[in-house]
Image (tube, rainbow, N blue to C red):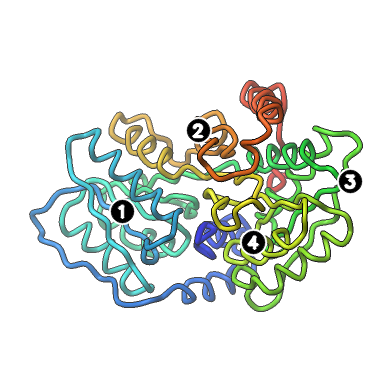
Amino acid sequence: MPISLGICTHQFASHLLMESKMTATSKFMQICLGSVFALATGFVPVKAEETSYVLVTPSRIGVNKFLGLGKTGIEKAAEAQGTKARIFEGTDPSTRRQNVQAAIDMKAPIVAVIGFEFGDIIADLAPENPETNFVIIDTCIPDAPENVYCAVFREQEAAYLAGAEAALTSSSKTVAVIGALDIPFLHRYTDSFALGAKAARSDINVLPTAWIGGDNPFQDPVRAQTQAALQLSNGADRIYAVAAGSNGGVFKAVADKPGAMAIGLDVNQCGDAPGAILDSTLKRVDVILPATIDGILKGSAKPVVSFGLAEGGLELVAMADDVAASGCMIAKTPDVIGQLKDIQAKIISGAITVPDPMAQ
């Protein structure tokens, strides 16, 4: 998502399940993606008397920046309350369930999980454990019990900014977006990117979305590179990569094309292809997780909370204070960053409304 998108890399898969309303495609991908990342047994036995905030991940954190943000988020939340944070790393359906149960057994007041892989697990266990508050990041479950809180994103807002950024920096006046699979959720990225590009520059040409497809669209960099090469041959010099584990193929294609650059997804991917990545749209799990937990503790949390630019749940690396050290090429164009800040401010104020393609 991502992994995390990066995790399929993970967050994409989470929306693939929930945001596409469990279509046949999403059900298939749920099964496939749930097994792709199984590595080794990850069950964590704990002592019943321990009390901590617990984050349960669907796979090993390792170099997965997206899951790493979750770790940072639970640690921030625990520190704010003077308690401890525990991280239980799952690897497959069995260890994920065992780890959630272990957190319940140790009487953790807060149990946070990331991704669609935990949908059935939380649906089963939450009603039986009303004293435990569960937080699901980047997805939700239907008819959630009162002790389940969902923290999701308005992805279309960041994608709109990415489109504006691509258009404002394009020399060829042609930009493109490559998505993993043509499903409703991913149109939040592809459609909104095109909308932002056209709004920022009237003479911009946005190529039709290229879909990777195939048997493993979220983990097929070879097909992604082929699609990116086609978009580049059609004149694009900026490509938004919305393909999780396939993004590396897009980055390889733009790195081989002088003057071309890509925009990464969910985490800062600028280091994946130095000099060839303009920017990345970020999902700030490290922000929304402690914010959600704080709301639960104060009694103000809603069952589903949506985070966008205004709440700091989404952003471009370009907006970060440390953009100069980010490795993103956008750092070399402060004038464009200024324009993007103006657009972001208008989105936050409501002067610009970014429609949700899934609500149409």
Labels 2 & 3 near each other (Cβ < 8 A): no
Residue 312's mark?
A: 2
The CA span between labels 2 and 4 is: 23 Å
Tag 3: amino acid = Asn
Please identify, in this view, whether the residue under mark 2 or under mark 3 is nearer the observer: 3
Q: Position of residue 38 (x, y in %)?
A: 41, 75
Labels 2 & 4 near each other (Cβ < 8 A): no
* Helix, strand or loop status at disc 4: loop
Q: Is residue 174 above or below residue 290?
A: below
Q: Is residue 239 above or below residue 212?
A: above
* Helix, strand or loop status at disc 3: strand
Q: Which residue is mark 4?
A: 243
Q: Which residue is mark 1?
A: 55
Q: Residues within 10 Å of mark 3 (few under 14, many from 20)?
A: some
Q: Position of residue 210 (x, y in %)?
A: 79, 62
Q: Is residue 4 visible?
A: yes
Tag 4: amino acid = Ala
Task: Work out whether mark 2 precedes mark 4 in sequence or the reverse, and give the earlier one.
Answer: 4
As rendered, which of 4 and 125 lies closer to the eye? 4
Task: Work out whether mark 3 precedes mark 1 in sequence or the reverse, and give the earlier one.
Answer: 1
Task: Work out whether mark 2 precedes mark 1 in sequence or the reverse, and give the earlier one.
Answer: 1
Q: Position of residue 165 (x, y in %)?
A: 72, 38
Tag 2: amino acid = Gly
Q: Which residue is mark 3?
A: 205
The CA span between labels 4 and 1 is: 26 Å
The CA span between labels 2 and 1 is: 21 Å
Q: Residue at x 70, y 39 (%)?
A: 160
Q: Quadrant of the C terminus?
A: top right
Q: Residues within 10 Å of mark 2 (few under 14, many from 20)?
A: some
Q: Quadrant of residue 56?
A: bottom left
